[in-house]
């Protein structure tokens, strides 16, 4: 879950529930660590407006970097 302007107060609880649900089964990538939603612009949730596109690109690069070591551990053909 990335940062958002709308519902920001709910993010810690959603993260807590997410970690509790997925930890036994998989790795969780905390997008709040690599995103900061702009104070103005957009709908408060999505990152598709011009000022947020660099944030979205930065998120994608961080997610790729975090997941690459995990993907390398997969058997061939399981990517």
Image: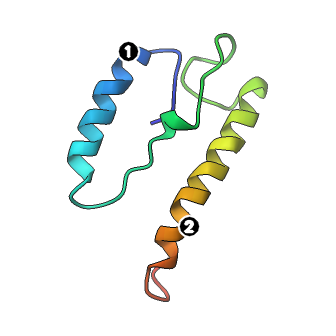
Image quarter (top left, top right, bottom left or bottom right) of the N terminus: top left
Residue located at (68% from left, 32% from top): 48
Asked if 57 appears above or below 35 in the picture, the reply is below
**Which residue is found at the position 74% from the left and 34% from the top?**
53
User: Residue 20's image quarter?
Assistant: top left
Give the answer, above or below, for where 23 lies relative to 19. Answer: below
Q: Earlier in the sequence, mark 2 or mark 1?
A: 1
Give the secondary structure at mark 1.
Answer: helix
> Which residue position is annotated with label 2?
68
Q: Position of residue 51 (x, y in %)?
A: 77, 24
Q: Nearer the viewer, residue 65 or 54?
A: 65
Cβ–Cβ under 8 Å for marks 2 and 1: no
Give the labeled residue for mark 1: 9
Residue name at image x 52 percent, y 22 percent: 4
Instruction: Give the residue drawn at x 21%, y 47%.
Output: 21
Percent across and percent down for residue 22 are 26, 52
What is the residue that sits farthest to the right in this orientation?
A: 50
CA distance for labels 2 and 1: 31 Å
């Amino acid at each position: 879950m990335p940062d958002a302007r709308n519902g920001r107060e709910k993010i810690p609880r959603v993260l807590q529930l997410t970690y509790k649900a997925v930890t036994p089964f998989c790795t969780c990538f905390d997008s709040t660590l690599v995103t900061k939603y702009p104070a103005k612009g957009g709908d408060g949730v999505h990152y598709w407006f011009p000022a947020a596109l660099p944030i979205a690109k930065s998120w994608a690069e961080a997610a790729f970097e975090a997941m690459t070591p995990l993907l390398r551990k997969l058997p061939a053909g399981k990517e």
